[in-house]
Amino acid sequence: MSRKNRLVDVQLDANSLAVANPDVEHERRVAIFDLLEDNEFEIIDGEEGPYILNLSVQEQRLVFDVKHENGTDIKIFILSLSPLRRIIRDYLMICESYHHAIRNSTPSQIEAVDMGRRGLHNEGSEILEMRLKDKIKFNFDTARRLFTLVCALHIRL
């Protein structure tokens, strides 16, 4: 994939985000940083990047608003959240359990919760990748990071 076909900026729509505590805000910033550090992202049958991605939730739909690096519009992809709703809910619950386990559990208990967390994260990434396969091409690491950001839109703490 061409180095042009990558994300150079990702923005989470402020209207889609719940008010969050500083820890959640930090998690969101880290997720964006990780995605921008290493990603592959290409619009299928579309214009080359580099791209800017604006992620939002509008009317219970996930919106990928893709723009050129200079800010001009390229394409908007809208996905129903229904196929992702259960996995997002389960993933956020297990993340909460993981953070609790880090403070209160044995290493083997932490490892067990972490394995479940990673499994759900992979499952959510695969669903996202499948839902966008005819629209956007990206590698699995990028899918994982995008799923993290989709979950970040749903954190309510």
Image: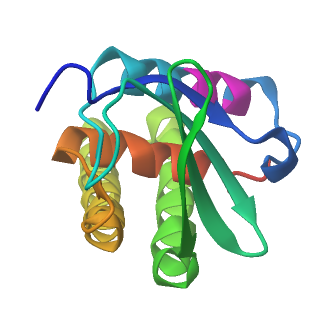
Percent across and percent down for residue 121 are 34, 56
Q: In the rendered view, would you say 150 is above or below 79?
A: above
Whether residue 110 is visible to the viewer of this picture, yes or no, is no
Q: Quadrant of the N terminus?
A: top left
Q: Nearer the viewer, residue 72 or 126?
A: 72
Residue at screen point 50% across, 50% down: 95
Percent across and percent down for residue 122 are 25, 58
Whether 28 is among the magenta residues is: yes
Q: Nearer the viewer, residue 83 or 137?
A: 137
Q: In the rendered view, would you say 127 is above or below 73?
A: below
- 61 sits left or right of 10 in the view: right
Percent across and percent down for residue 43 are 32, 48
Whether residue 117 is visible to the viewer of this picture, yes or no, is yes
- 131 sits left or right of 133 in the view: right
Instruction: Say how the picture is coloured.
Output: rainbow
Residue at screen point 32% across, 71% down: 127
Residue 135: quadrant of the picture:
bottom left
Label tally: 0
Q: Which residues are magenta?
A: 24-29
Residue at screen point 75% across, 42% down: 13
Q: Nearer the viewer, residue 153 or 9?
A: 9
Whether 8 is among the magenta residues is: no
Percent across and percent down for residue 68 are 50, 29
Q: Main secondary structure of the magenta part?
A: helix
Q: In the rendered view, would you say 82 is above or below 14?
A: below
Residue at screen point 26% across, 54% down: 44
> Residue extending furthest left?
1
